[in-house]
Amino acid sequence: MSEPTKSNLNNARFLTVEGVEGVGKTTNITFISAWLEEQGVPYIHTREPGGTPLAEELRSLLLAPRDEQVDATAELLMMFAARAQHIEQVIKPALAKGIWVLCDRFTDATYAYQGGGRNMGFDKIQQLESFVQGDFRPDAVILLDLPVAVGLARAAKRGALDRFEQEAEGFFHRVRDAYLNRAKENPSRYWLVDAEQSLELVQVQISNALQKILADQV
Ligand code: TMP
């Protein structure tokens, strides 16, 4: 039997949160976790790259600043290597038990960062997505959107910059554009949240989206 396109085995949902650096992912993932707990929804919170011991090691390798120029194809393959491990070890087993998966970034980040940011285009990513995931996709993607300069100023306050955060501003404009294009192309799966508003208003938008996702209006 082929994989279902929607991940909601046992009605559990696979929810991802995306956005450019400094957009407020961490704060809002904490908010989403609290919301799920209040609703009595069983869930796990995980992240990409990462989420298993092997994938977390790949994450460290990917994020570490280094003198050696990292080849874009090597970077892309490492993202998908970590993802393959994460999907099989963590994401699918949780969904199969009826546990929701709340994931900080997933394949949409590959389209945005490697496809857009690194200018790799989207064909190779689509091929790897099919190879690694079959038809498996998130049920809902919450995209936090903010002007790049605002996000980067916030990220700069957090201390030492990782290898991605050290990229020039143009990189992040390409990342944001790629995210916004994907949201436009997949309106039924994407929940676009204006993250420039006050935290209170951002969280109103998120809880409206969560209510609809819970009611399965995705
Ligand atoms: P973050 O989780 O702290 O945002 O850091 C992860 C970094 O990895 C972030 O800069 C985005 C980047 N990334 C990619 O380039 N491609 C991917 O597929 C994923 C999941 C993350």
Image: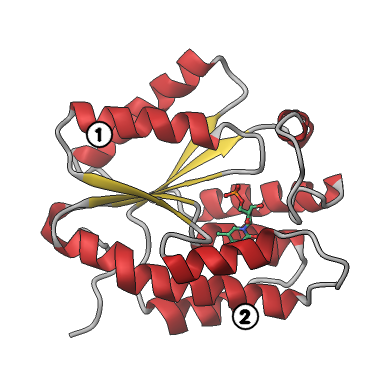
Is disc 2 surrounded by few (<14), some (14 to 19) or many (20+) residues within 10 Å?
some
Residue type of the residue flagged with mark 1: Leu
Kindly identify which residue carries mark 1.
36
Q: Is residue 98 above or below residue 74?
A: above
The residue closer to the viewer here, 171 or 59, is: 59
For residue 132, which numbered disc appears in the image?
none
**How many callouts does the rendering have?**
2
Q: Element under label 1? A: helix
Task: State the image quarter where residue 148 is shown.
Answer: top right
Task: State the image quarter where residue 34 is shown.
Answer: top left
Kindly identify which residue carries mark 2.
124
The residue closer to the viewer here, 151 or 134, is: 151
Residue type of the residue flagged with mark 2: Lys
Residue plotted at (62% across, 62% down): 60
Residue 46 image point, x, y percent: 39, 52
Residue 127 image point, x, y percent: 53, 82
Residue plotted at (32% across, 34% down): 33
Q: Element under label 2? A: helix
Residue plotted at (79% across, 32% down): 149
Q: Is residue 182 above or below residue 118?
A: above
Residue 162 image point, x, y percent: 73, 51
Residue plotted at (86% across, 73% down): 68
Residue 56 image point, x, y percent: 51, 63
Task: Say which of marks 1 and 2 sits in front.
Answer: 1
Quarter of the image with the N terminus is bottom left
Left/right of residue 129 with respect to residue 32 in the rendered view = right
Q: Is residue 185 above or below residue 42?
A: below
Q: Is residue 12 above or below residue 58?
A: above
Q: CA distance from mark 1 to mark 2?
A: 35 Å
Dot 1 or dot 2, earlier in sequence: 1
Where in the image, quadrant-wise, is ligand 1 located? bottom right
